[in-house]
Image (tube, rainbow, N blue to C red):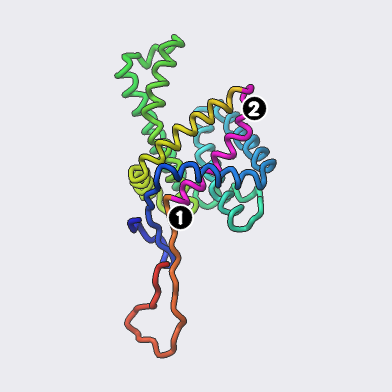
Amino acid sequence: MQPLFSNTKEQQITIAKRPARAVFDWFTLGFKQFNQHKLHWIILCVLMYTTVLALTMIPLIGEAVGCLLLPGFFTLSAHVVEKKQFHFEAVFSAIRYHYLPLLQIFAVNLLVSFICVGIASHVTEVDLNQLDQVESFLKLMQVAAFMYLPFLLIMVLASALVVLHKVAAFEALKYSAYGCIKNLMPLFVFCIFSFFALFLAVIPMLLGLLVFVPIMHCTLFIVQKEIFVTRQTFKLPENDDDSDDGSDGSLYV
């Protein structure tokens, strides 16, 4: 693990390099977290995604709301792990305390998506002003989605750094990209496994999504926790005759 940054005097965050086999541990731990409060997770995901999808009828508004609301699943997962309780209101702490950096990540995400669509239009030779043909539109979106996928994971993990570790938006994006590059193989396996699970989830009239979506949120929390490791400082007992050289005798453990 390499030191990454210190956001407070009490902790340091490092990037860990995980093996590809760790993916199965991530999903196992994610499922266990979901299984403890499965009904609560399903109800919350239905409410949240229904709200976001309804707001997508208004251009950009639904996407912005989703960028603000969905990172709240990270704070909720952290609350469940630490407090051993499921409180619905914990999901709103992200939008309450971190709305500005999350909006900055949304702006970067929007810019990246536009760039991907523009490059896909050039590659597929599809005119963006003539997307009335379904075949051309699907061809364009498939290429754009393939190009955008790596950036999606970077954006998701960056939002986790913002809401869980209070990292500034652009620093979070930089460190998230570095973490993804360092864990390229396990994250590649993670994406392949996720797509396979998604394919199985949509077969029974999309009902499998009721389980797949909350498990993915729980698993993503495990992913960021495994990659971005927080080390707390260990402080020696204070002594009256400590020197005044500015050192507090603390070590990272």
> Please, what is the three-letter code of the amino acid marked with disc 1?
Lys
Q: Residues within 10 Å of mark 1 (few under 14, many from 20)?
A: some
Q: Which mark is residue 166?
A: 1
Q: Residues within 10 Å of mark 2 (few under 14, many from 20)?
A: few
Q: Which residue is mark 2?
A: 207
- The residue lying at 42 percent from left, 21 percent from top is 141
Q: Tell me the mark number nearer the camera, choosing from 1 and 2.
A: 2
- The relative height of residue 2 versus residue 156 in the rendered view (above or below) is below
Residues rendered magenta in the picture: 204-226
Seen from this angle, which residue lies furthest top? 133
Point out residue 225 in the picture as x, y percentages from the top left corner: 47, 51
Quadrant (top left, top right, bottom left, bottom right) of the C terminus: bottom left
- The residue lying at 49 percent from left, 42 percent from top is 24
Point out residue 72 in the picture as x, y percentages from the top left corner: 55, 46
Query: Image check: 212 left or right of 5?
Result: right
Tag 2 or tag 1, which sits nearer the N-term?
1
